[in-house]
Amino acid sequence: MGSAAAGPKRTVWQVLSSYFYWTYSRGSFHYDVMVTLILLFIFVTPHLWDYGAKPSAVTHPTHPFQVVQNGRGVIITVQASDVGVAPGASYRGDDVFVERWETVSDARGNLSWKVWAHR
């Protein structure tokens, strides 16, 4: 007595195209293979490839800064070495509008930023 007749043999191209179009039902062998490959890609490739996504280095001010109340907002004075902003750049944050800023020197000759900001 012979074994049950197997279905027609499929080519590799037919199997790969059925993977691409996701034609297998949940719980089947090929469905499980596809899900396993996707999960492997998600969890393994960040360790193998450098996507260039690095957290920015958090730097804290090394010098004290001064905050003075102004009519519309505040004037903040920060040493230039604690600020990574090019002179003349403009910035508008979500909560604070920086009206203007300038560089000033303190009594020791240290360069500082003087910033006029308000909400």
Image: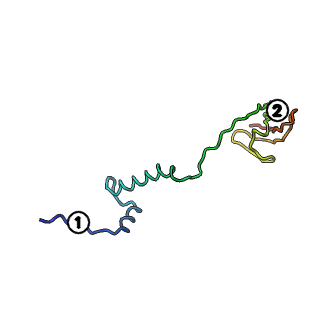
List the residue tagged with mark 2.
71
Q: Are marks 2 and 1 in contact (CB under 8 Å)?
A: no
Give amino acid for label 1: Ala
Please state the horizontal and vertical placement of residue 81, each as a whole percent of the image. Answer: 77, 39
Image quarter in which the C terminus is found:
top right
Number of marks in the image?
A: 2
Which element carries disc 1, helix, strand or loop?
A: loop
User: Position of 33 compared to 44: left or right?
Assistant: left
Disc ID at residue 106: none
> Residue at coordinates 39% horizontally, 64% vertically from top-left?
16
Location of residue 101 by image quarter:
top right
- Residue 79 versus residue 37 in the image, above or below: above
- Residue at numbered disc 1: 6
Q: Residues within 10 Å of mark 1 (few under 14, many from 20)?
A: few
Q: Nearer the viewer, residue 64 or 72?
A: 64
Q: Residue at x 36, y 61 (%)?
A: 23
Residue located 34% across and 69% down the image:
11
**Percent coordinates x, y for residue 102 in the rendering:** 84, 41
The answer to whether residue 2 is left or right of residue 27 is left
For this orientation, the residue located farthest to the front is: 48
Which quadrant holds residue 99?
A: top right
Compute the Cα span from label 2 to label 1: 86 Å
Picture residue at 56% right of the left edge, 52% below the top:
50
Q: In what quadrant of the picture does the N terminus appear? A: bottom left
Query: Which marked residue is nearer to the observer: mark 2 or mark 1?
Result: 1
The answer to whether 36 is drawn above or below residue 9 in the figure is above
Q: Position of residue 70 (x, y in %)?
A: 82, 32
* Relative side of 7 to 89, left or right: left
| Residue 72, quarter of picture | top right
Mark nearer the N terminus (2 vs 1) = 1
How busy is the neighbourhood of tag 2: few (under 14 within 10 Å), some, or many (20 plus)?
Answer: few
Tell me the kind of residue under disc 2.
Gly
